[in-house]
Image (tube, rainbow, N blue to C red):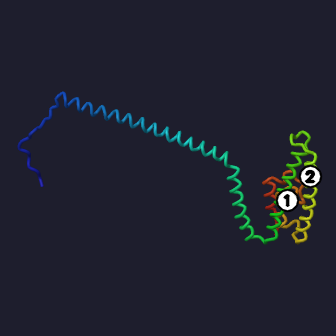
Amino acid sequence: MPRKPTEKVIEHRITFGDFERNAVKKALTLQAENQRLDAATSTLNAVGVAVGGSGAILAGLALLKWKAPEIIDTITEKAKGVLDDFTDGILPKTPVEYRREAQALAARRGQINAEINRYCSSSSPDFNASTCSLAHEAKDQYFEDLKAFQARVRAAQITEDSFYWRFIFGGLGDVDPEYSDPNAGSTRAWWSYFLNFDL
């Protein structure tokens, strides 16, 4: 529907005096300052977050350095339990028990070796002839226990080229009867040895 044309036009004007003009100028100036302050505040907030984040990271690293051995030991112990339970479910009990015994022998060998290096070296500040003699006696007993352990494994009819043999002895250094490779204790050598199996 078309509109009717307007008959008359009334124009209203608002004229500001000095007081009103100063008030508008003041409002515009405050708005510009607020925008600059908002930009500066945002920048400072970002800097604060970065500083706070860096501080949190440094605090975390300090805590890790201080508590890492305990944390790693706790995680390792919990993981061993879970892995042992998982392995017990897959493999027969005897190879798993033998593997644990072989690991204990390897740990014992490492401890004996550390004692020999500490107490039997004349350049060591802890050199002690009687403690060195005891360490060598422990070493001799270790090798007797190792031979007895290997004989028990053979008596359990676990053949030397089987998967179970590699499972028991793999990666444990001189606990393994076939130990001759200087890299045999490394993870890479152990995995290549362990994965080259036939049941």
Q: Cβ–Cβ below 8 Å for labels 2 and 1?
A: no
- Furthest residue to the left? 7
Please report the residue visible at 67 percent of the width from the left and 46 percent of the height from the top: 66
Please report the residue visible at 90 percent of the width from the left and 59 percent of the height from the top: 178
Mark 2 or mark 1, which has the lower sequence index? 1
Is residue 100 toward the left or the right of residue 41 in the image?
right
Amino acid type for the residue under numbered disc 1: Leu
Quarter of the image with the C terminus is: bottom right
Mark 1 neighbour density, 10 Å: few (under 14) some (14–19) many (20 or more): many
Quarter location, residue 175: bottom right
SS class of the residue under badge 1?
helix
**Residue placed most toward the observer, 4 or 23:** 23
Q: Which mark is residue 105?
A: 1
Residue underneath mark 2: 134
Please report the residue visible at 63 percent of the width from the left and 46 percent of the height from the top: 63
Alpha carbons under labels 2 and 1: distance apart: 18 Å
- Image position, residue 161 (x, y; %): 87, 65
Quarter of the image with the N terminus is: bottom left
Q: Vertically, is 14 above or below 191?
A: above
Amino acid type for the residue under numbered disc 2: Leu
Is residue 30 toward the left or the right of residue 16 in the image?
right
Mark 2 neighbour density, 10 Å: few (under 14) some (14–19) many (20 or more): some
Please report the residue visible at 81 percent of the width from the left and 68 percent of the height from the top: 95
Q: Vertically, is 23 above or below 1?
A: above
**Residue placed most toward the observer, 37 or 170:** 37
Quarter location, residue 168: bottom right
